[in-house]
Amino acid sequence: MTVWDDLRGQPAVVAQLRQAAEGDGLNHAWLFTGPPGSGRSNAAKAFAAALNCDQAEVNRRGCGECAACLTILGETHSDVAFVRTEKVTITIDEARDLVATAGNRPSSARWRIIVVEDADRMAERTTNVLLKAIEEPTPRTVWMLCAPSPADVLVTIRSRCRAVALRLPPAADVAALLVKRDGVDQAVAERAARAAQSHVGIARRLARDPEARERRLETVRFPLGLRGVTAAVLMAEKLVKIATEEANSSNDERDAAEKIALLATLGAPESGTLPPPMRAQVKQLEDDQKRRAKRSVTDSLDRTLTDLLSFYRDVLIIQMGNAVELVNLELRSELEEFAKNSSAETTLGRMDAINKARKRITTTNVAPLLAIESMASSLI
C-alpha cells in the first residue's frame, strides 16, 4: 500500500507528483484542478504525505505506512494544514491565519504544507492576502490549492503555481477502489460508480447507503410522471424536500455535538442563563452552522439536479444511437420508451433548463423552490 493507491485512473498525475516528491520539479506552490469527484484534495493529500514521508530512500517516498504518511492521511500532522470551508466563502481573516501559519518553519517534518481545498471559494480581496505569501514563501513551505478549473483562481495566483490537472476516472476504476478500500460488493460498487458518474465521494455514499440509492432512483424517475403543470409543481416540491432532508440529516447531529463540545470547553453551567461572553461564542457557532446548513442544502440540490440531468443525458444518448454506456442502465426500457416521444433538440432544451436552474441556485439568492418550479415547467 502507498499513498497513491486511492488515485485511481490518474496515472499521469501520479507520475508527475512522484517525480516531484523525489526532488525533480518540486515547486513551492501547486494548483490542483479537475471536475468535482476527480480527487483534487486526495491528490494534494497524497502529495503532502509523499513530501514528508519518513522513508530515507527517495524513490520510496509515499510509503503509506510510516508515522508521517499515516498522520498526514489522517489529517493530524502538526506541519500539514488542511483548509476547507462549509460556508459560502473562505473569509479574509481565515486567509490571514493561513499566511501566519505558512510563515512558521516546520516543527518536525521536511516541509510545512498548506492545503487549501476550496481555493475557488475565496473573494478576490481574500485571495490577494495570500498572494505575497505564495510569491515569496518561506524556504520550507509548500502551498497546495485546489479548484475545479484554473479560471476559478486569480491569474496572479495561478501564474505562480505549478499545475496538476486531474480528470474523472473511469467508472470501472472507481468501482475497483470501492471494492478494495471499502469492501463493497462488486455489483453494488459498479452500479454506484456508474450512477455517480465517476464522482468518487458520491459513489462511496451510494454504495454504503441503500436509502441514498433509493432517493436517487426516485429523483431520476421523476420525468416519467410529468403530465402537466400540476405534476411539475409537485415534482419541484419533492425535489427540494429530498435535497433538504438529505442535507439536514447530516447536519442536525453534528450541530448538536458541536454545541455540546463548545459549552464543555467554555465550562458553561449545566442550567441557567449563560454569561454574556459565552452567549456571544454560542451565537457565533450558531451563525456558522446556519451558513453551513445553507451551503449544505445548496450542494444537495445541485447533486439532486445532477441526478435528474443524468436521465435526460441517457435519453439523448439513446436518441443519438447509443454511442456510450448509459448512466441509469437499470432504466433502459423506460428510457427508450421516453426517447421515442421526443427529439434530441427537445432533450437538449430540457438539459439546458436543468443547468440554468443549477447555476441560479448556486450563484444567486433565488429561492430554491421558485428556481426548481420554473425548471420543472420547462420539462413538460
Image: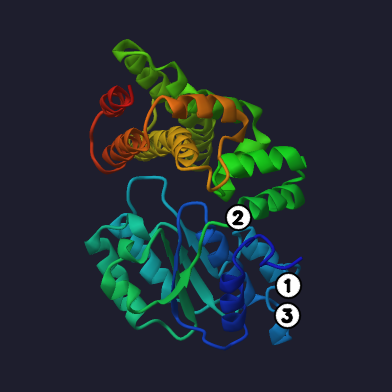
Residue type, numbered disc 3: Arg
User: Image height check: is 117 above or below 228?
Assistant: below
Is residue 303 rendered to the left or right of residue 57? left
Find the distance from the CA under tag 3 to the CA under tag 2: 27 Å
Image mark for residue 170 = 2
First in sequence: mark 3 vs mark 2: 3
First in sequence: mark 2 vs mark 1: 1
Q: Which residue is mark 1?
A: 63
Crowd band around label 2 with a 10 angstrom C-alpha radius: few (<14), some (14–19), many (20+) = some
Q: Secondary structure at mark 1?
A: loop
Does any portion of residue 108 appear in the rendered image? no
Q: Which residue is mark 3?
A: 60
Crowd band around label 1 with a 10 angstrom C-alpha radius: few (<14), some (14–19), many (20+) = some
> Which residue is depicted at the point 69% across and 42% down?
189
List x then y, in percent, for residue 128.
Answer: 25, 69
Is residue 98 rendered to the left or right of residue 246? left
Q: Secondary structure at mark 3?
A: helix
Q: Nearer the viewer, residue 340 or 362?
A: 340
Crowd band around label 3 with a 10 angstrom C-alpha radius: few (<14), some (14–19), many (20+) = some
In the orientation shown, which residue stands out farthest toward the top?
230
Q: Is disc 3 in contact with disc 1, using a CB cutoff of under 8 Å?
A: yes
Image mark for residue 28 = none
User: Image height check: is 284 above or below 8?
Assistant: above
Find the distance from the CA under tag 2 to the CA under tag 1: 25 Å
